[in-house]
Image (cartoon, helix red, strand yellow):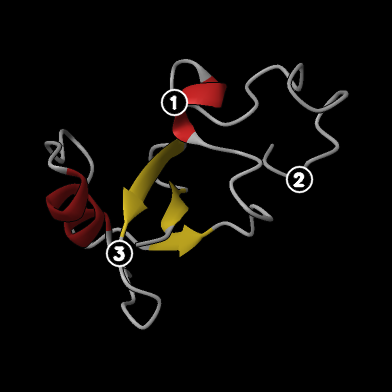
Amino acid sequence: MPTYDYRCDANDRVVEVRHGMSEEIRTWGELCARAGIETGDTPPDAPVRKLATGGQVVNASSLGSGSACDTGGCCGGGACGLM
């Protein structure tokens, strides 16, 4: 099963999950349920978007704290567009 990275703009978190190609995850609550994590202070209905990672180039473990490119250091000053 492929892995996908999703970003929630409401909390600036990127979460990596596995699911079938035809499955769609649209909300933070759905993403958290799939990943087995708590929603925390973020509303469960907050929208998430699938990141185009190009074959797992960006994954949760490479982002350290799970926040996407806080300093731009991972991609030359924010060139990846995740800022």
Q: Residue furthest front?
A: 1
Reply above or below: 14 against 26.
above
Q: Nearer the viewer, residue 20 or 82?
A: 20
Q: What residue would you read off at disc 3? A: 19
- What type is the residue that disc 1 sits on? Gly
Q: What residue would you read off at disc 2? A: 81
- What type is the residue that disc 2 sits on? Gly
Question: Which picture quadrant has residue 83?
Answer: top right
Mark nearest the camera among 3 and 1 is: 3
Classify mark 1: helix, strand or loop: loop
- Give the residue drawn at x 44%, y 16%: 65
Mark 2 or mark 3, earlier in chain? 3
- Residue 26: give x, y in percent of width and height: 33, 70
C-alpha distance separating marks 2 and 3: 24 Å
Q: What residue would you read off at disc 1? A: 66
Mark 3 or mark 1, earlier in chain? 3
Q: Nearer the viewer, residue 2 or 70?
A: 2
- Give the residue drawn at x 11%, y 36%: 38
Reply above or below: 78 against 65.
below
Which numbered tag is attached to residue 25?
none
C-alpha distance separating marks 2 and 1: 16 Å
- What type is the residue that disc 3 sits on? His
